[in-house]
Image (tube, rainbow, N blue to C red):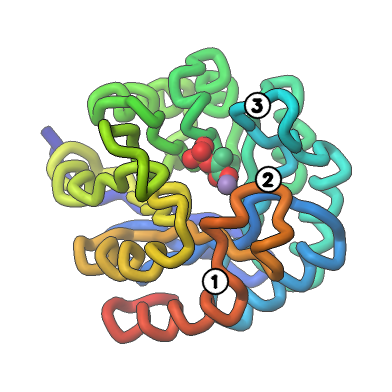
Amino acid sequence: FRHGEASEVVVPTPNGDVYFGERHPIVVVAGPCSVENEAMIVETAKRVKAAGAQFLRGGAYKPRTSPYAFQGYGESALDLLAAAREATGLGIVTELMDAADLSAVARVADIIQIGARNMHNFSLLKKVGAQDKPVLLKRGMSATIDEWLMAAEYILASGNPNVILCERGIRTFDGKYARNTLDLSVLPVLRSLTHLPIMIDPSHGTGRSEYVPSMAMAAIAAGTDALMIEVHPNPAKALSDGPQSLTPDKFDRLVQEMSILGKVV
Ligand code: PEP
Ligand code: MN
């Protein structure tokens, strides 16, 4: 069981240091599932910044179930994220899938995301543990809490203390109405087990944009330190995860509602 104080993860961004942790306001990471082109990523970045987000998310390397589905634009998408960072000062969160891309991803990412499917990829965890960008570690879709915490230990033990845990829904017996089962009970459970900051991702957690606002509010009520929310300027045309993406207008409304419930930066 946990001993001592909650730790904080401080992430420098062009707009200033952002603090993740129990003693700090809720940090909001928002943006599209995939980076699609410069206009959409820069426009989305401006909109989510205006709404109150501190970080822009966007995938360059996408872990898709089907090898025939859109795989992300790779390095050229990293350049577009750099342009969005430059235009808005937002920090960037983007996923690393392959250790070979670590230096390219670390050049633009302020936080490196390890996706649910790579939570058990111990050699990748050791690699991100041996560099100094903060790491967002998503929970594997069938990972127990102990397995998730041990995955975090791989990063910590390799020398990187800046790890944020992200619950993104787990696989249960009923996937008919929601893509996953968002396990909000991790909030009180992890508080007793770890000092690390906790993020909730209601977008992948539900898979349906209409369920995202209530789950984001519930996560705040349960004490989350941060939220990740997918936002796309035209969800119907998104190259990935359109059904779970909020429009910028809906995201703006959600952040206003969230600010009533908890201190959102
Ligand atoms: C994502 O953040 O777009 C993503 C692929 O997430 P996960 O690893 O949780 O499925
Ligand atoms: Mn996605």
Q: Gap in Å between the C-alphas at discs 1 and 3?
A: 31 Å
Residue 15: x, y in percent? 64, 71
Q: Secondary structure at mark 1?
A: loop
Residue 67 shows in this picture: yes
The circle on residue 66 is 3
Q: Position of residue 158 (x, y in %)?
A: 47, 21
**Element type where label 3 sits in the image:** loop
Residue assigned mark 1: 53
Dot 2 and dot 3 residues touching (CB under 8 Å): no
Kind of residue at disc 2: Gly
Amino acid type of the residue that numbered disc 1 sits on in the rendered structure: Ala
Earlier-in-chain disc, 1 versus 3: 1
Q: Is residue 37 above or below residue 86?
A: above
Mark 2 or mark 3: name the one nearer the start of the chain: 2
Closest to the camera, between mark 2 and mark 3, is: 3
Q: In 3D space, how far apart are the residues under numbered discs 2 and 3 (Cα atoms)? A: 16 Å
* Residue 72 point in image, percent of width and height: 76, 39
Q: Which residue is at the front of the view, 170 or 193?
A: 170
In the rendered structure, which amino acid carries the disc numbered 3? Ser
Would you say the beta carbon of the disc 2 residue lies within 8 angstroms of ligand 1? yes
Asked if residue 135 shows in the view, the reply is: no
Compared to residue 137, the image places residue 235 above or below, namely below
**Picture residue at 33% right of the left edge, 28% below the top:** 148
Residue closest to the eye, 218 or 53: 218
Secondary element at tag 2: loop
Q: Residues within 10 Å of mark 3 (few under 14, many from 20)?
A: few
Q: Is residue 149 left or right of residue 102?
A: left
User: For mark 2, what is the residue?
Assistant: 59
Question: How far is disc 2 from disc 1 in space, using C-alphas?
Answer: 17 Å
